[in-house]
Amino acid sequence: MDLAIFLDAAKEAALRAAEVLERWRAKFQVKEKGRFDLVTDADVESQRAIQAYLSARFPEHAFLGEEEGASKTRPPIDAPPTWIIDPIDGTTNYVHDCPFYCVSIGLQIAGELVVGVVYDPPHKEMFAAAQGHGAWLNTRRLTTSATPALAQALLATGFAPDLRGNEQALEWWRVLSFQTQALRRTGSTALNMAYVAAGRFDGFYAFDNHVWDVAGGTVLVREAGGIVTDVDGSVYDPFTPDALAANPLLHPLLVETFKKGLG
């Protein structure tokens, strides 16, 4: 199976979705999926553009996505290759014209994530990776940072749309603020993980992810030499809400920190 073909298709689908986002940016209608969780007409049209293109290329493939027209449940191990789509990761940023949002596309085959694309339209940055092919930013090959200590680390995290009931995110922000050089909350999980792959962030953690948030970024981090697990260091399951991605020097230190707990 030639993953390069799937990777090229994912990149083209992301570019087509980005064109949709740019057309809608000044005229979309904002709705709420839930309190503090925005959805726009642009989300829906972006996902439709991705699915239309990939369905035409690979009619036997399945789809899992955040918006309408795709499954939201874990594919069985014998499922056909499944595209996992977030048509806008960072919707709140997009709604406010804050230029930190992206299109994220992953491909899962036989239960394993093998292709990942994260495209940042405002900055024209295409992060792309396939298993065994490395990770790339446009034409530059990516490697994670070599930061060896928490005190030198720039970490990113994500918060739930509604923090009520998710206060542990605030507690860990407090704890890690004293142990690291700095923390960032950007509003886009996929870009956070892409930035770990690029060495811009040394690590990323969060407790409330969905699989479409992390599918593309997981492949990027791994192909750039980083490690992705659950926050306790266990084998990563992208269908569980927590995630820890970091360079290989920092990752065990973060696992140790999370295992100690908030105290």
Image (cartoon, helix red, strand yellow):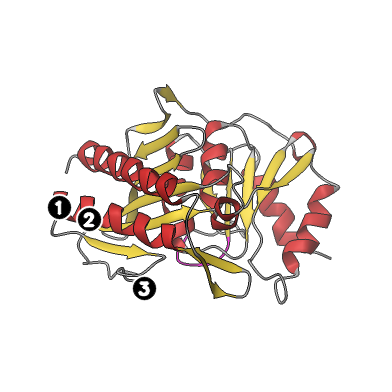
Q: Residue at x 57, y 55 (%)?
A: 95
**What kind of residue is marked 2?**
Ala
Q: Nearer the viewer, mark 2 or mark 3?
A: 2
Query: Within 10 Å of the Cα at label 3, are there few (<14), some (14-19), or many (20+) other Cα atoms?
Result: few
The image position of residue 50, as x and y in percent, is 29, 52
Q: Quadrant of the N terminus?
A: top left
**What kind of residue is marked 1?**
Ala
Is 18 displayed left or right of 57 in the figure? right
Query: Within 10 Å of the Cα at label 2, are there few (<14), some (14-19), or many (20+) other Cα atoms?
Result: few
Residue range (magenta): 237-242
Indicate which disc residue 110 carries. none
Is 71 displayed left or right of 244 in the figure? left
| SS at circle 3 | loop
Do we see residue 246 in this rendering?
A: yes
Q: CA distance from mark 1 to mark 2?
A: 6 Å
Q: Find out whether residue 241 is within the magenta segment.
A: yes
Q: Quadrant of the C terminus?
A: bottom right
Q: Are marks 1 and 2 in contact (CB under 8 Å)?
A: yes
The single residue placed furthest to the front in the displayed view is: 27
| SS at circle 2 | helix
Using the rendered view, name the quadrant where residue 163 is placed: bottom right
Which residue was labeled with disc 3? 73
Q: Nearer the viewer, mark 3 or mark 1?
A: 1
Q: CA distance from mark 2 to mark 3?
A: 20 Å
Query: Within 10 Å of the Cα at label 1, are there few (<14), some (14-19), or many (20+) other Cα atoms?
Result: few
Front residue of this view, candidates 251 and 1: 1
The image position of residue 168, as x and y in percent, is 74, 67
Front residue of this view, candidates 135 and 14: 14
Do we see residue 214 in this rendering?
A: no
Which residue was labeled with disc 2? 52
Q: Residue at x 13, y 60 (%)?
A: 60
